[in-house]
Image (cartoon, grey):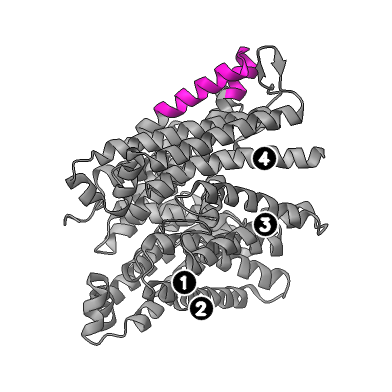
Amino acid sequence: MLLVLLINILIVGAGYGLIAIAFAVMSSVSPFFNLTLGSIIAFGAYGTYGLTEYAHLPMAVAIVISIAFCACAAALLERFVYTPLRTRGASSMVLLVASLGLYTIFEASIHLAFGPQYQILGGALGQNMNLGIFSMPKVQFITIVADFIVFGLVNLLLFHTFFGKMVRALNDSAKLANITGLNNNKIILIVSMLSGLILGLSGVLTGFDTGLEPTMGFNLLFKGMIGAIIGGSGSLYGPFLGAFFLAAAENVGVMLWASEWRDLVAFVIFIIFLIFRPQGIFQRKEK
Amino acid sequence: MEYLINLGILFCIYAMLALSLNMVVGLSGLVSLAHAAFYGIGAYAVAILMTMHGFGFWSSMLAGVVLNGITAFAVGKILSKFKGDYYAIVSAGLSVIVFSVLLNFKSLTKGPLGIYGIGKPSVAGFHFSSSLSFLALAFVFVVLFYALFVLIDKSSFGRALKGLREDEVLTVSLGYKTTKYKSLIFTLSAMMAGVAGSFFASYIAFIDPTSFQLAEGIFFFTMITVGGLSSAFGSVVGAALLLILPEALRFLGLPYETAAQLQQLIYGALLVMMMAFRPQGLFGKFKV
């Protein structure tokens, strides 16, 4: 029983973790609630679905193309929507509402193109694999591994390379970074491509695991966002562990009551954290 | 003719929602996406009390409005700790919580099955069962809400709200208890949304939780963002515009599902355009 709970937490938390990391990285250079990040998740899943189902491409090729598309989409949105709005002095509220509008457009477009019905990416990844004492679908195992790898790589990039130093400088003060000669827009573009890659990957994995529907991005993004915020910013451990914390709370809630209350538990935890510990679990500094 | 009356009643309900939401978002600068929650509580109060407990329309509506007042007072206390985009996100979270309760607290709300057979109001023996009389009744409330908006806008209370919207620290330093003002306007707005919900439940006669999702709250927010923030006239125009636009699509003869998504697409595009070119809306006096 306990083992099942722990494995569930690991699976769900890894799924949220990917999104939490992407959200945290993105908002470190472009600090607002960017709802189109949710659309990117859906792009990854539906891109793969469309390319295999309608263009009959091999699965691996479809996955690579759609994740690359996600990276480009994230960069294009940043370059042609958010950066221009920001240079015109738009508040983070205006950016949030603009991203809400864009999210609505993308969701409706996916709906129109693929229909409202629930779909799932088929193939070998959905099959079960045996891990000795228990078995789980391959895709869930891959999700867990991917979460740890992405965490490791992004952590390396942000805290042990020169590029990471530039990103953190921009995060501290965009103005100062610019004065000292950093090309802010270029850094933001690269970071958005990176977060697009991670989100696209998470979309593809979700497509194999729980399936796709046009609204999938919104819920997932919110979970990742909650994970990132309750984890705390400042280091990558925050979003990574925060996602597992959220998954743990949700799964315990589901075990105690019923699975319908999953979202309610997540949002209650989110609000409790924002009130009593807005800096998150892993940040000591007061904000 | 019946079609036009139907449209008129929906317009009245949307106008009530837009006017009440604009008091919070426009007058006070608090971007709340939780309006659908209060709309839903009002609707469900009427639905549950009328169909299961034999209450009349007005007493159920009153119960819903009072319940909304209490809920909003508590929720407002939580929300008052946040500002700007955090306020918006937390209010969205609260909306999800209320939707989740409406959907899953099946012993009370019947969950996704919804509640049907909700009756119409009556006053002194007159039963508002014809659409035209219902329209007239709803319109009376729109006029009342409009007047209330203008009254608050012009009052010292309204000036304090606008003050805290523009510069909260300064307003506090002038001796205004801004937390109290914020809580008061939020509660009032939620109670008004409850009235709109009651009318909706009674008119449609069947409600289920999907009418009170976060997406609905975002739709109400779109109405006032397009019409104009902090303006009573703008609220009404926004409600009318966003109601008529999809109706126009209906004449293209598209299948229902396609038309519904096309409508979402247009709403999204409107929001983006407004943010890019006119963040205060058509007749607005305040930019988010």
Percent coordinates x, y for residue B118 in the rendering: 68, 23
Q: Residue at x 21, y 51 (%)?
A: B170
Q: Chain of mark 4?
A: B
Q: Chain of mark 1?
A: A
Instruction: State the quadrant of the C terminus of chain A.
Output: bottom left
Q: Residue at x 31, y 36 (%)?
A: B77
| Corner quadrant of residue B254 | bottom right
Percent coordinates x, y for residue A157 in the rendering: 30, 76
Say what secondary structure mark 4 lies in.
helix
Whether tag 2 and tag 1 are in contact, CB under 8 A, the answer is yes
Left or right, B42 with respect to A287, comes to right
| Image: magenta residue range | B46-70
Which residue is labeled 2 in the image?
A72
What amino acid is labelled 2 in the image?
Answer: Cys
Gap between marks 2 and 4 measured at Cα:
42 Å
Which residue is labeled 1 in the image?
A196
Residue A22 in sight: yes
Which residue is labeled 3 in the image?
B263
What amino acid is labelled 1 in the image?
Answer: Gly
Which of the two discs, 3 and 1, sits closer to the camera? 3
Residues at discs 2 and 4 both on one chain: no
